[in-house]
Amino acid sequence: MSRTKVDREHVRTLYERHSPVLLAYALSLLHDRAASEDVLHQVFMRLLQGNVAINGPPLHYLYRAIRNTSLNYRREHSRELELAQNGHWLESPPGMEETGLALQSALAELPDEQREIMILHVWGQMTFEEAAAALDISSNTAASRYRYALAKLKERLQPLAKE
Amino acid sequence: MDWSDDEFEAFLRQFRPRKPKALPTHRRAVVALATAVVIVVALVIPTRFASKSPAANDSTQTPASTPSAATNSGDGMSQRRNRVPEANATPPDAEKGTAMVSSSPTLSGLRGVKRPSPPSNAVTAASGAVNRRLRVGGAVKPPIKLVDVKPVYPEDARAAGIEGVIILGIVIGEDGSVIETRVLRSIPELDQAAIDAVSQWQFKPTLLNGEPVEVEMAVTINFTLP
């Protein structure tokens, strides 16, 4: 498999374009904004320092790196994270703040693996194939996890949204 | 009435992820640029003044203060860099506190960490280069550990509640012993304990075309308190 290094300019572009969703992904795992930004910056700093050789598309690497770094962080700092819980990672359109909160708590109740496919597909705008490659699962698994997650969210949110 | 998946996705996308802060490197780049400018100015101005009016002492006063500021900031940076590998905690015996050790050559952050030696792979090693050294990763599997020594949790660190992960870059010699250790991710209070333990490890020698070779890999050592 070929390994590529990502040049600094490309790293910047990746950051500009994808950092909000990557941050959301980290937040969905850590529920703490400061910790999530730390994780995000750690991952990008490693890239900028040029110490990382990447297999496959850089974006896929980024999602994996965010997940691994977040999980490491969660393991090391579980006590602090329990206290924090300040991770509002979605901005609601005006007048829909309540729905936004409901959405976020519904997302928080999903299992990690369903939530991450939600984030990658809906906000990361990745196809199932891309998301599956980034998460190292089969695209059928990705699609079925997504269906479960979507059904649960619909069930929770439809009554609110249709009011 | 129910929403279709597409409608529902569109509904979800109205909620947008928040933007994070800018990367800290932008600021670092600016600082580096500013330092460079100060140094250049500091170097250029005195020579200009000197060539214009060699006898004028007043004019050299202002620029003279600038280089010292520049070198100070330079020293600050190198101090910060040097601080990391320095480990001075001596590890007295400790019974409480566990140190979990795992070698994780696949850890993403460690691939291709800059080494003093030229990048070596199977090809250069096979071509009979003096430095026969493989790096774990890809087709090169980590060697099998024969002797494992658990790190001793330093008393000071335990008392202070310091825990975390240390990452060491190690070189395993042709005989399977650890001949080089470098701290890649440091916790100053715990580094020495990790190095002491890892230095005692023994691995099964790695053979390339039947000949033993040196192997580079990264190991993570996890210090956790109960």
Image (spheres, rainbow, N blue to C red):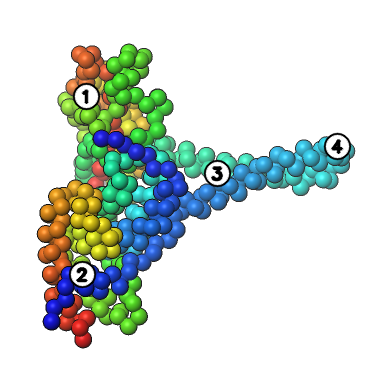
Q: Which residue is mark 4?
A: B54
Lower sequence index among marks 1 and 3: 3
Whether residue A151 is situated above or below residue B209 in the rendered picture: below
Local SS, label 3:
helix
The quadrant holding residue B183 is top left
Q: Residue at x 16, y 76 (%)?
A: B3
Q: Are marks 1 and 3 in contact (CB under 8 Å)?
A: no
Among numbered discs 2 and 4, the one appearing first in the sequence: 2
* Any part of residue B134 in sight: yes
Q: Nearer the viewer, residue B22 or B196?
A: B22
Closer to the camera: disc 4 or disc 3? 4
Q: Residue at x 73, y 40 (%)?
A: B44
- The alpha-carbon separation of the residues under discs 4 and 3 comes to 33 Å
Relative to B161, residue A82 above or below: below
In depth, the one of B180 and B224 nearer the eye is B180
Q: Quadrant of the C terminus of chain A?
A: bottom left
Q: Earlier in the sequence, mark 3 or mark 2?
A: 2
- The amino acid sitting under disc 1 is Gln
First in sequence: mark 4 or mark 1? Answer: 4
Residue B76 image label: 3
Quote the CA–CA distance across marks 3 and 2.
55 Å
Give the residue at mark 2: B6
Q: Residue A28 placed where, x, y %?
A: 25, 62
**How many other residues sit within 10 Å of disc 3, few (<14), some (14-19) or many (≥20)?**
few
